[in-house]
Image (spheres, rainbow, N blue to C red):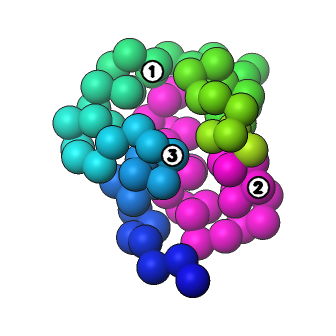
Amino acid sequence: MDTSSHTILGLFAQLGLGEEQADVDQFVDAHGGLPSTVQLTEASCFNDSQKAFLSQEWSNDSEWAVAIDELNALLR
């Protein structure tokens, strides 16, 4: 049973990217400016496992979809 928080911070923790707002800020600073032609699920800043998670959860419109959309917006 998934009991994690489905926020941007929870998503970062799920992806193994950190659990603090500073982790989100650093990631966005480092990887922001993602071209509109590149789907989030294909961005080079994610490993294959992270890409698979993002793709599956977003396409299934899971509870993570809102946080994934927020991450997508932050990286644009």
Q: Residues within 10 Å of mark 1 (few under 14, many from 20)?
A: some
Residue at image location 57% in from the left, 83% down from the top: 1
Count of marks, rendered view: 3
Could you classify mark 2 by the number of other residues whose Cα lies within 10 Å: few (under 14), some (14-19), or many (20 or more)? some
Q: Percent from the top left, x then y, of residue 50?
A: 63, 40
Callout in the foreground (1, 2): 2
Residue extent of the magenta highlight: 53-76
Q: Is residue 64 left or right of residue 6?
A: right
Residue 15 numbered mark, or none:
3
Give x and y (percent) for residue 56: 76, 55
According to the picture, the residue beneath numbered tag 2 turns out to be 56
Distance from disc 1 to disc 2, alpha carbons, whole Å, reads: 22 Å
What secondary structure prevails in the magenta region?
A: helix
Q: Is residue 54 left or right of residue 23?
A: right
Numbered badge on residue 68 = none
Position of residue 67 relative to residue 5, above or below, is above
Classify mark 3: residues with Cα within 10 Å, few (<14), some (14-19) or many (20+).
some
Asked if one can make out residue 34 in the rendered structure from this viewpoint, the answer is yes
Q: Secondary structure at mark 3?
A: loop
Circles 3 and 1, Cβ within 8 Å, touching? The answer is no
Residue occupied by mark 1: 32
Residue 70 visible in the snapshot: no
Depth order, front residue of 16/57: 16
Residue 11 pos. (x, y %): 46, 54
Residue at x 37% of width, y 27% of height: 27
Tag nearer the camera, 3 or 1: 3
Quadrant in the rendering for residue 47: top right
- Distance of mark 2 from mark 3, alpha carbons? 13 Å
Foreground tag (2 vs 3) = 3
**Which of the 4 quarters of the picture holds residue 7?**
bottom left
